[in-house]
Amino acid sequence: MIGRGSGRIWRGAILLGTLLSACSPAVRGYDSTARTIRLREAPVEVACWIGNRPHECIAVLKQDWQTVVISYEAMCVQLGGSAANCHTQVETPGP
C-alpha cells in the first residue's frame, strides 16, 4: 500500500516545492531583464590618451551615460546595497 501512493505524493511534493521556490522573490533576486536601457545614440570607438599612454575608448552621450549609471545604482540598492555602497549619494563640490 505504501509503495503505490507514495510515488504520487513525492512527485506532488517535488512539483509544489519547485513552484514555490521559483515564485519566491528572495530566490529569484533582481530580474535584470525587466528593464532594457535604450541609448539615444550608438557608442563610438575613439582613440584617447590617459596620462601619456594611448587607449581605445568608447564615447557615449552624457545623458545616456547618466541613464546607465542611475540604472545600475538602482539595481544595486534593490539587491540590498546601501546608498553609500551603491554610490547613490550626490556629492556637492566644496567651497
Image (spheres, rainbow, N blue to C red):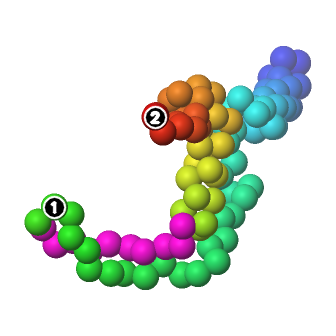
Q: Is residue 34 visible?
A: yes
Question: Residue 30 in the image: x percent, y percent?
Answer: 67, 42
Marks 1 and 2, Cα distance to the nearest angstrom?
Answer: 28 Å
- Mark 1 crowdedness (10 Å alpha carbons): few <14, some 14-19, many ≥20: few
Question: Residue 87 in the image: x percent, y percent?
Answer: 52, 36
Which residue bears the numbered disc 1?
Answer: 51
65 to 15, vertically: above or below: below
Question: Residue 31 in the image: x percent, y percent?
Answer: 69, 48
Which residue bears the numbered disc 2?
Answer: 95
Which mark, by number, is residue 68? none
Secondary structure mostly seen in the magenta stretch: strand
Of tags 1 and 2, the one toward the viewer is 2
3 sits to left or right of 37: right
64 to 11, vertically: above or below: below
Q: Earlier in the sequence, mark 1 or mark 2?
A: 1
Q: Is residue 7 visible?
A: no
Please state the total of marks drawn on the protein image. 2
- Looking at the rendered structure, the kind of residue marked 1 is Gly
